[in-house]
Amino acid sequence: MKRISIKAFLAAFLLIGGTGFLSAQNARVKIDIERTIGEVNQNIYGNFAEHLGRCIYGGIYDEGSSLADEDGLRKDVLEAVKGLNVSLVRYPGGNFVSNYHWKDGIGPKDDRPPRMELAWARLETNRFGTDEFMKFVKKAGTEPYLSVNMGTGTIEEAQQWVEYCNVKEGPYYAELRKKYGSVEPYNVKYWSLGNEMDGHWQMGHLNAEDYSKKALEAAKLMRLTSPEIKIIAAGSSNYTPGADPNEWNSTILHELRDVIDYIALHMYVGNPNDNYYNYLSTPRILEERTQIVKGMILREMQGAERESPDPIYIAWDEYNTWYRARTDKALVGNNALEEHYNLEDALVIAGFLNAFVRNADIVKMANMAQLVNVIAPIFTNETGMFKQTIYYPLALFANNVFGTSLDLFVDCDTYNTDNFAIGMGEVTTQQNGVPYLDISATYKDGEVILCVINRHKDKAIATDFISQTGMFNGDFEVYEVNGPDTKADNDFGKTQVETKQKPVIKVNKSDQFSYSFPAHSFTLIKGKIVE
Ligand code: AHR
């Protein structure tokens, strides 16, 4: 038998496309800084903290811990939050808010009433409330976004909370805030009218007509109290079979179109059947839903009588991947929703962020759900914390991706998925023509910032970037989030997935440069475009 030489073997291996190192696909991307989509709003780098599991207690707030400061706030968590450059934090829920009475959480801590927490089956001590949250956002260098109780709460209660937070002095709740230590008002700008009120799981769940009536009156009282506030209505997130999210969204948009500033949408995805390519395509579904709601908004803006000069925007005020910690047991108690993330989850998060940037004209807020321990980028125990894989793409975006979102031309290979369930219990879908490269670009102060996901599991993709207006010039910085394989993860004392700075790409006044994106990676590139 004739023996095959190593050279011939390698040639054959290359031909059939052996590994990411040995074979590559090619792609082309054209960048035109005059072809713009909209301004990226920094509020797309928001986050969310709910009274759920160990997000607040044992996460943000750890009274008595040697890791906490004089206010009971975890110093290591604060540092990690700062690294995410979080623009605003939604609070206090989530499902929790629909039975939360904010007055339980103010005043001397030992006098606050403990309550049964019915959404996630815990005891709520109320030792962390409005004033503690405001201390947290101040120390973390971020902004508060409060959600009012539209389930078991009243419109009067909502009005009084706005008064407590935003009225300088005079009326009872403003004076109460002063009495409890905060002389100056908090001036909370963002307020949402309840959470997922279309969901049958929501305490005090309403139909679209009843929600609209209650929300309209709440908005009226809240704005009379503090005219500058921005109001967010609860859109539908219920894509389980039989639900009609479009019906809910179109009804509430119609009824509330004169008074609201945003419609809130939520989306969680997962990989329960362990199909990498299906899973990596899920941010496209968020993009489809964005376009559907954008169409509804455009329709309602015709004939609306708004005081605001702006149209209604979309706030994706809960998004993440969440499917492992979704068993009956994982949904309740002090350790609820503790999802442990890997590299493929981080790539999906990068996909969501690319989708927000590509839809910068209409998506003006997004909040990763949630901040600490509960489906979160930051994970603590009594002695420390670690950064989950999803921390890294979020930090790269939130610290770099600003300016004008650009409409790119991308030419690369694509794949089709089968019919799959995008999340637990949700309708199935098929995605065709999913590009292996998922890219967004922004332009700011003469710099272009490219965010590139190579979804290919095995192959690098050699990509030519072509400038159609101006020349690339200088050293292009490169940051990569990757790991040894798609299941690589982080833990206490183990960091397999993180951001690594790569050698710069040197460009000498050229309308073109090339870069090869390794398999299963997220890369951020930034550099100058000159005349
Ligand atoms: O973020 C976890 C939960 O997911 C929130 O409480 C709820 O709004 C959503 O269903």
Image: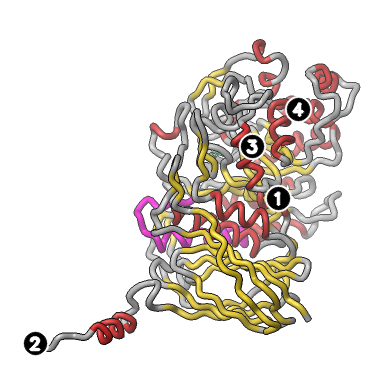
- Which quadrant would the C terminus be assigned to in this image? bottom right
Amino acid at pointer 2: Met
- Which tag, 4 or 3, sits closer to the chain's start? 3
Dividing the picture into quarters, in which one does residue 287 lie?
bottom right
- Given this view, does label 2 or label 1 mark the residue nearer the observer? 2
Task: Give the Cα separation between the discs numbered 3 and 2.
Answer: 67 Å
Task: Give the Cα separation between the discs numbered 1 and 4.
Answer: 23 Å
| Local secondary structure at mark 3 | helix
Question: Would residue 208 be visible to someone looking at this image?
Answer: no
In the image, which residues are magenta? 269-291
- Which tag, 1 or 3, sits closer to the chain's start? 1
Residue found at x 85% / y 35%: 226
Label 2 crowd (10 A; few <14 / some 14-19 / many >=20)? few
Label 1 crowd (10 A; few <14 / some 14-19 / many >=20)? many
Q: Give residue 444's position: percent from left, percent from top.
A: 75, 66
Predominant secondary structure, magenta span? helix
Q: Which residue is mark 2?
A: 1
Task: Give the Cα separation between the discs numbered 4 and 2.
Answer: 85 Å
Q: Which residue is mark 3?
A: 78
| Numbered label attached to residue 43 | 1
